[in-house]
Image (cartoon, rainbow, N blue to C red):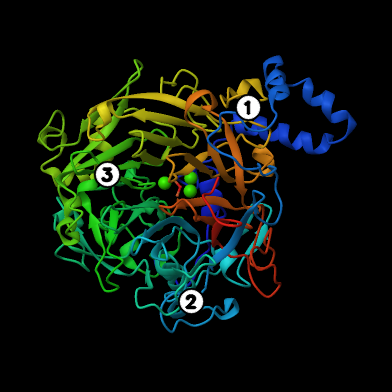
Amino acid sequence: MTSETSPRPFATPSEIREAGEDIPSNTAANPTMGDIIGARWSRRDILRGSLAVSAIAATVSPLALTAGRARAGSHPESAFDFAEVTAGSDETHHVADGYDARILMRWGDPVTAGAPAFDPMNQTAEAQAQQFGYNNDYIGFFPIGDDETRGLLFVNHEYTDAHLMFPGVAVVTDDGVTIPDFTKEMVDIEMAAHGGSILELVNSGDGFEVVADSPLNRRITATTEMHLTGPAAGHDRLKTAGDPEGMTVLGTLNNCAGGVTPWGTYLMAEENFHGYFKGDLPEDHPEYANHSRYGVPGGWYEWANFYDRFDISREPNEPNRFGWIVEVDPTDPNAVPKKRTAVGRFKHEGCETVVNGDGRVVLYSGDDERFDYVYKFVTNGVFNPDDRAANADLLDDGTLYVARFDADGTVEWMPLVYGDGPLTEENGFASQADVVIETRRAADLLGATKMDRPEDVQPNAKTCRVYCMLTNNTRRAAGDENAANPRADNAFGHIIEITETDGDFASTKSTWDILLKCGDPSVAEVGASFSSATTENGWFGMPDNCAIDADGRLWVSTDGNSAKATGRTDGLWAVDTEGEARGTSQLFFRVPVGAEMCGPYFTPSGETLFLAVQHPGDDGPSTFEAPATRWPDFSEALPVRPSVVVITKQGGGRIG
Ligand code: FEO
Ligand code: CA
Ligand code: CA
Ligand code: CA
């Protein structure tokens, strides 16, 4: 299918993601727990006033009312000490009193030397490729030197929202927002707004600033040349007309979260790559079943109309070249990024790293889809802190494991190794290349535990515990619960804590517990499990990303809270994991309406926190002309802009 222009489907990528939908046409009609709670929140708005108290009291359990009375600020043994932000929803961000939140980079700000200033009414692909991309997600930071006055910032640009980026194209109908004429120029701008940014930062005493025109500043886009490495590199299933060797891919797609390696490289996780493909394959095509397992073609974008490689009927192997972890060396602006196929191919939410006691490096990654899995990868080689170059190809050699969470509280990490168990010719695996290309099917055969959308999986080097964000899964039917995913119609998600055995992150048998079941604890049928010290502001739904700070404390950011769903926007919550305060959560920062909170990242000193505000203003039928907010500039001349925020404590010191 090729045409000059074509309509964007009614559901925008944000709407699809917000609904947790993977395929736009797949719309579940049943009322869910989220609908029920959403209706309750709407009713609270209507009933605000004298009637409201008794009306709400009639709907909550006696247990919840007890919890409500006990709420008087933070738990006395909390590891955190800050005045909680009031939960709610409005056009701007809010940070705890005593902290400064400053905008560091906005969509369109110049990145590379000589980049043009942002001109939203006349944007071009050439300009966008030199400017900060759209929908900042993962943030990583690697200091240069020991005193944290210089460093490199890594920022993913996960996806684009054309209806908020381009003037005069979006049409609002009863069914939502559509774009009737999608041009090649728009597609080229979208491709240039994907990928990542690398920025040199300097702190001269007043907080980090971007070093304008630094030779290290770099944009990576959906057309940047990258190499495949590891077991699938050069395999026939990765060869295309444009790359007959199966070794060189153009670009990276849907870079959600990521990681920083101990040697200071930037890991970009490719998540919903299926959304960029269109076209059909006959059911007897050798890649048909493989693509179906990943939701390919997703048809979210119009790129296939102008570039054959995104049309699977023309390039059936192109989707196999996405869904990987991409490693970028930020110290060399010409370094070719590497897609590390040993780490597996799935919808990687992120890829967080830790150095094990024996020097091996362990990577954790969730596959963000309902009923998909939690993985870790253990390198065979050991990290060499004295010779950076010696670590260059560590991620090409190691073992990928998938988790089975047993009801007795143990985790079995099962190796995905060609020839082991069912991963043989009999089941269509002829080599480790097949195992990593079809990681999901290999994990299916091993009997991995089907999870409620695994997002960030974060190791805590101080405690040897690992936090796994399960964002939600309203398609888990009653009767389909398991010990690690205990709620049917799980609208608000939960957090699992894994304890790796004997301080060994490479252990293959660990234990697990549920740290939190999320949602409003004052509504008994939700079944949330925040501590009773958690205030009305402190609870959240839909945990997504998380970070461990310099003191080993957990911070959780969310995706999917809204005035309608939970009476609050997304934000960043500080969550106690230790002692009597365990399960207490407090709101530190909240985003403007329509946004999702991404990228929490603390510098090693714990004195600077970077946050990514993604898709602000995307609430209801929002467009370039009429966004739900014009954050962060609040100028009629400028569109709403996803931006990175830098947070410091007034007067200095550790955050939180
Ligand atoms: Fe990009 Fe799993 O959210
Ligand atoms: Ca997210
Ligand atoms: Ca998410
Ligand atoms: Ca993280």
Which quarter of the image is occupied by the C terminus?
top right
Q: Residues within 10 Å of mark 3 (few under 14, many from 20)?
A: some
The circle drawn on residue 533 is 1
Label 2 environment density (alpha carbons within 10 Å; few <14, some 14–19, many ≥20): many
Q: Which residue is mark 3?
A: 290
Q: Please state which of residues 168 and 57 is positioned toward the viewer in this rendering.
A: 57
C-alpha distance separating marks 3 and 2: 40 Å
What type is the residue that disc 3 sits on? Asn
Q: Position of residue 25 (x, y in %)?
A: 50, 46
Q: Amino acid at mark 2?
A: Pro
Between residues 59 and 549, which one lies in front from this camera angle? 549
Q: Which tag is nearer the camera, tag 1 or tag 3?
A: 1
For mark 2, what is the residue?
110
The answer to whether 114 appears left or right of 228 in the picture is: right
Query: What is the C-alpha distance between the residues marked 1 and 2?
Result: 45 Å
Tell me the number on the disc at residue 321: none
Tag 2, which secondary structure? loop
Snapshot quadrant of residue 309: bottom left
Q: Amino acid at mark 1?
A: Ala
N-terminal-most mark, 1 or 3: 3
